[in-house]
Amino acid sequence: MLLNPIHPAEFADLLDPLGPFEPQPLLAVAVSGGADSMATALILRDWARGRAGAVVGLIVDHGLRPESAVEAELTQQRLFACGITAEILPLHDLKRGARLAERARSARHAALEAACAARGILHLVFGHHAEDLAETVVMRLLAHSGPSGLAGMAALVETQNIRRLRPLLAIPRQRLRDTLRAAGVAWVEDPSNQDLTQQRARLRALRSEGLATEVLVAAATARGRTRLAEERQSAHALARGLRLSPFGYAVLDRPVPAAALANVIAMLAGATRPPSLAQVGDLALHPRAATIGGVRLLPAGRLGPGWLLVREQAAIEPPTEAKTGTLWDGRFRLLRQLPAPDCAIGAWGDQAPRDRAGLPSLVLRTLPALRRDGQVIVAGPALWQGSEPFIHFCPQSWMTGGGFCALPPVAIPAAVPGAAQGVIRVG
């Protein structure tokens, strides 16, 4: 059998543009044990070694099949044999039921990101390839995705904590298997890939190899270039027309592209996905009072000219236990030790004053408050006060697809007029 493995120089040409990387890079690779991820781990190991770096394999065990734990251990041993450090990440709370694939993906990504954070790793590499990209495009076509979605998977996605890299989106699956065969490395065949109750497995069974995949990949690549240009246009429009506050609201001074407005709405709502362009298209052209995607749009009034975008109070997450690192309402993360034990974090709500730190009640009611036994300890602008604020605005999605947000990682209280007067202490 004639093999066509991926060569180190070829892989470097695919990965290097997704940098920058450290002088001695430490990267993680998500490894299921299948051929795609095992091959990715192998070639990533060689790339890192050539730069005096290292690779860590992260193996997520969903626990959905009785044999999954054994397969995870086998995969770990295979990675050890290849000179790759590997860690198994078991998931204990994932149950079968509705939206299993979506829930499993979210749990997997959360576990991978947590493991990267624990090891101080910034770059997480996935083994998605050309057929994966083609299947994603077809799935989005069937779901009536907008033009941006038809670009398929992105080679680079930046989150709050890591950079997700997919360098192999132009490489056919067969070449990944050839890479393993050439190296004499085995892999696990996951039976879930043949589960025809899952849409991706059905598409894989129906899809013809070769030209169909090449056409879909070429179309997605072209659409990706267009998406990048649109994102740059949105970024410029937002830089000119949007004033974003570290208190989690924004003022829009002028119309922006619909995609940009949708991303702003998702960010202010603490959502991971923006509302559809059909929902926001007319609002982008002709702003008016409306509520969409958990965000209210209304005249900015004394906050200045334009339109205020603020979290819808009725949609805010209920109070929850307040611990360092907690992300509340998908918007605000607690940064440090709280002023008292057994606190809860929730919306300031109707207990908020009519005005504080120059902010109207409409905004203040959406800000977080720390309570103990129902009594407010610290709330609103006071949480940002001092050189070590308790909290910062940490949305789950960005205003532009490139991973940029016009906000410092920790708000600077001195930049907020009147913040020093925002202290509330009860009891």
Image: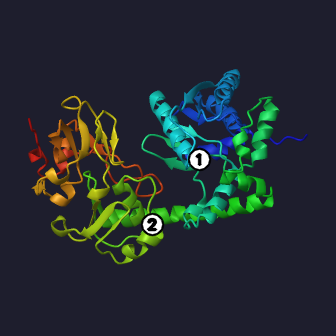
Mark 1–mark 2 distance (CA, rounded to whole Å): 27 Å
Q: Is residue 52 above or below residue 372?
A: above
Tag 2: Cα neighbours inside 10 Å, few (<14), some, or many (≥20)? many
Q: Nearer the viewer, residue 309 or 66?
A: 66
Residue 25 place in picture, x, y as percent: 54, 32
| Amino acid marked by disc 1 | Ala
Q: Is residue 280 above or below residue 97?
A: below
Q: What residue lies at 60% left-to-right and 35% top-to-bottom?
A: 29
Q: Residue 392: which quarter of the image?
A: top left
Q: What residue lies at 47% left-to-right and 62% top-to-bottom?
A: 231
The earlier-in-sequence mark between 1 and 2 is 1
- Would residue 385 be seen by someone viewing this image from the given angle? no
Residue 40 place in picture, x, y as percent: 67, 38
Residue 291 place in picture, x, y as percent: 32, 67
Check disc 2 and report its element: helix, strand or loop.
Answer: helix
Q: In this view, does 137 lie above or below 108?
A: below
Mark nearer the viewer, 1 or 2? 1
**Where does label 1 land, which residue?**
101
Q: Is residue 189 left or right of residue 102?
A: right
Q: In which quarter of the image is the C terminus?
A: top left
Q: Residue 179: which quarter of the image?
A: top right
Tag 1: Cα neighbours inside 10 Å, few (<14), some, or many (≥20)? few
| Amino acid marked by disc 2 | Ala
Q: In this view, does 214 lie above or below 116?
A: below
**Where does label 2 land, which residue?**
259
Q: Is residue 23 left or right of residue 266?
A: right
Tally of numbered tags: 2
